[in-house]
Image (spheres, rainbow, N blue to C red):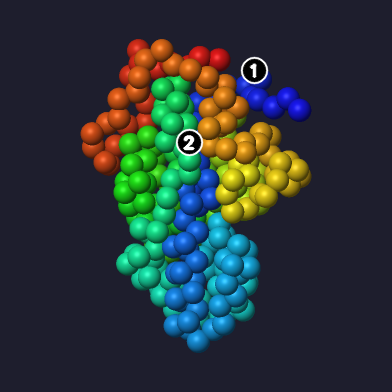
Amino acid sequence: MKEKSMGDKRYSCILFDMDGTLVDSYEGIFHAYEWSLKQMGREFGGEAFVRRAIGAPLLWAFESLCGMGLAEVERAAAEYRAYYARKGKHQVRVYAGMKKALRQLREGGLFLAAATLKKESFAREILEEQGLLPYFGAVCGMDENDSLTKADLIRRGIEAAGCKREEAILVGDSTFDAHGANEAGIPLLAVTYGFGFRSRKQAESSGAALVADTAGEIPALLGVKRCSRGFTLPTSPGFADPFLPIYRRRILW
């Protein structure tokens, strides 16, 4: 079957979910939940629990999946983040082909932003440690009050890009991403190699406009096929310059 692509659509801002999309962070998340629930004297449901919780807001997972009250939720979240700060954020690997895909997109002159429900400080540390931070013009993560939704983070990314909503698309692996994209009024490019969508059919049934089975497929689906000039990564790990100089932008459709 012929792959769908963006056709005549032009995107200038590509937003990426993190867990299950940019990086395989399953091990760290698994052990963070295991640790926090043990500290709370709660039974840990293992892989079945983590598969339901991953990608969801942390407080929601403890409240809705564990039946905790507000005080317990806050304590559990603190235990989770304490473990994650010590060990979990280092138990991460970048998906095969992702660095090359990000490079292609940046060479194509596109603005990249991370939009994750993970605490923003953790997100930045992980991206930097894994060598991905320089590709991103913005990192939009959860605030200290856990008050943001996926749609809020998507909107922040679009604002950082300085583009119209119609020029943005989210790349994500789960129904949480699909709901966030829908709420923000942008399309979803779903990936099936992560934690959420297990098949193209499942992804399409969630409203995905495009579907990638590997990270390497993402640039072509977005119309970026090749570039005539290499992209030089900025030397500063805190790089947040949203656009390459205009003479270096290469959008080849």
Residue 13: x and y in percent read: 50, 31
CB atoms of marks 2 and 1 within 8 Å: no
Query: Could you tell me which residue is drawn at 27 percent across and 31 percent down?
Result: 234
Residue at the disc numbered 1: 8
* Residue 152 placement, left or right of 232: right
Residue 140: x and y in percent read: 43, 47
What is the quadrant of the C terminus in the image? top right
> In this rendering, does residue 120 appear at all?
no
Residue nearer the viewer, 199 or 167: 199
Query: Could you tell me which residue is drawn at 29 percent across and 37 percent down?
Result: 239
* Residue 185 placement, left or right of 77: right
Q: Quadrant of residue 64?
A: bottom right
Residue 59: x and y in percent read: 52, 68
Q: Tell me which amino acid carries mark 2.
A: Gly
Which mark is first along the chain, 1 or 2?
Answer: 1
Q: Secondary structure at mark 2?
A: loop
Q: Quadrant of residue 199?
A: top right
